[in-house]
Image: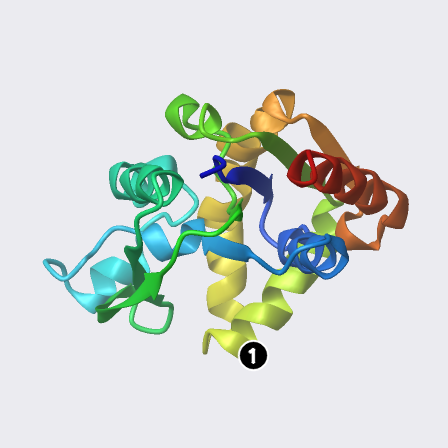
Amino acid sequence: MKKPLIIGITGGTGSGKTTVTKEIIKSISTDNVVVIEQDSYYKDQSDISFEERVNTNYDHPDAFDNALMIKQLKDLLEGKAIEKPIYDFETHNRKTETEIVEPKDIIILEGILILFDKEVRDLLDIKIYVDTDSDVRIIRRILRDIKERGRTLDSIIVQYMGTVRPAHLQFIEPTKRYADIIIPEGGYNKVAVDIIVAKINEIINE
């Protein structure tokens, strides 16, 4: 069995990682693809109150259960199915149920801090950083969190200024240096996406 290709797509909150992922999947010459979101691997917080969970810094590396994510990525590489955690952004905690994910030829790992941990970086065949202006990112985050995650505007702004922006500057933006490709303006950069897709097709058709 040919080793699956793992593509890492990272960038700050609201940078357009998901759009890039969708454009790649739409354009590559196979549908044998699975997307693993780093957000699924936020640590279980059942042992603390809802108020404490609200105040967790979700943009800090310590918020993620990287050990579980790495183990499950390795399982997929070995052709084993995994039980991926499901995270509930309204309760700020993992759900009790999990999602069965079968191994595929292409694994796309998407998240804000996937290039921060060397052990995760070493698993990636292609490393992509989506680079988008901060004003665009905060507007996208506001729209997403209100619509999809049940947040208020005030809570989004407080969280952004208190933890999201500082964490981006300290932990996320510096990981650009590990990227093979940096995409300005995300999925709307058709030239960059076409180059990536051409490389992926070349690898999977070898």
In the depicted view, which residue is nearer to us: 125 or 47? Answer: 125
**Residue at position x 53%, y 70% in the image:** 145
Q: Going by the picture, which residue comes out furthest to the right?
A: 191
Quarter of the picture containing the C terminus is top right
- 44 lies above or below 128: below
Q: Whole-percent x and y of residue 181?
A: 72, 30
Residue 78, picture quadrant = top left
Identified by mark 1, the residue type is: Lys
Q: Secondary structure at mark 1?
A: helix
Q: Going by the picture, which residue comes out furthest to the front?
A: 1
Residue 82, picture quadrant = bottom left
**Residue at position x 19%, y 57% in the image:** 45
Colour style of the rendered protein structure: rainbow
Give the class, few, some or many, for how many residues have Cα within 10 Å of label 1's Cα (few <14, many ≥20).
few
Q: Is residue 51 left or right of residue 89?
A: left
Q: Which residue is mark 1?
A: 147
**Residue at position x 60%, y 67% in the image:** 142
